[in-house]
Amino acid sequence: MIKGISHIGFDVKNMEAMLDFYCNALGMKKKFSMTFSQALRKMQSEPQAEMNEELTGFMQYLGQMGDKEWFVYLEMAPNQLIELFYQYGEKKELPDIKQYYGYQHFSLEVDNIHELWDRVCQYGIKPDSPIRKGVDGTYQFWLTDPDGNHFEVMEYTKESLQITGDE
């Protein structure tokens, strides 16, 4: 049975800027990080269900990348995480996702939307929208992280349809 969303992962252009944004500006905490060689050692120390060509190739890749940083997990709440992947090579910019079906945005729930608004503004970040109460009865505003990921910040109210389910 599904319990919730575990995490969302991003390939990042500038890890330092992303860590600053999510940890210092938004207040998330670094949960753990891993290098490629640490991952390889963990895989080698645990029995694999079945070694196949794909798994062998992946382990070779981990070995080639060595002690480079691979990813960082940031915790926003217990068991609610963002995974940031270091990139070692060129990647294309993501096109405007509003033109495509599929993923649109993610949303972060907060206890006090005005506190987070003040925090990000004091940190020098300009939100993409004002705080407003949506048609669903939930307070919201929008931010964009340093890599251009557009996301929503929400504070539920006693009238929030996400809570009441009323139509």
Image (cartoon, helix red, strand yellow):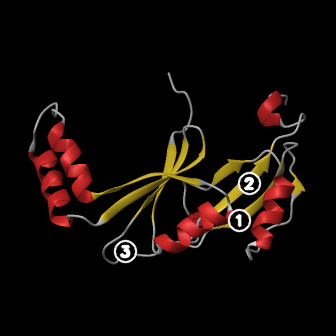
Give the residue drawn at x 81%, y 67%. Answer: 129
- For mark 3, does the 10 Å Cα neighbourhood hold few (<14), some (14 to 19), or many (20 or more) residues? few
Q: Which residue is mark 3?
A: 91
Q: Which mark is residue 62?
A: none
User: Which picture quadrant has residue 66?
Assistant: bottom left
Q: Is residue 94 visible?
A: no
Secondary structure at numbered mark 2: strand
| C-alpha span from label 2 to label 1 | 8 Å
Amino acid type for the residue under numbered disc 3: Lys
Q: Which residue is mark 1?
A: 143
Secondary structure at numbered mark 3: loop
Q: Is residue 19 visible?
A: yes
Of callouts 3 and 2, the N-terminal one: 3
Residue 110 location (% of width, % of height): 75, 47
Give the residue drawn at x 79%, y 31%. Answer: 163
Q: Which residue is mark 2?
A: 153
Residue 25 location (% of width, % of height): 68, 65
Task: Please state the total of marks drawn on the protein image.
Answer: 3
Residue 56 location (% of width, % of height): 11, 48
Secondary structure at numbered mark 1: strand
Give the residue drawn at x 15%, y 59%. Answer: 63
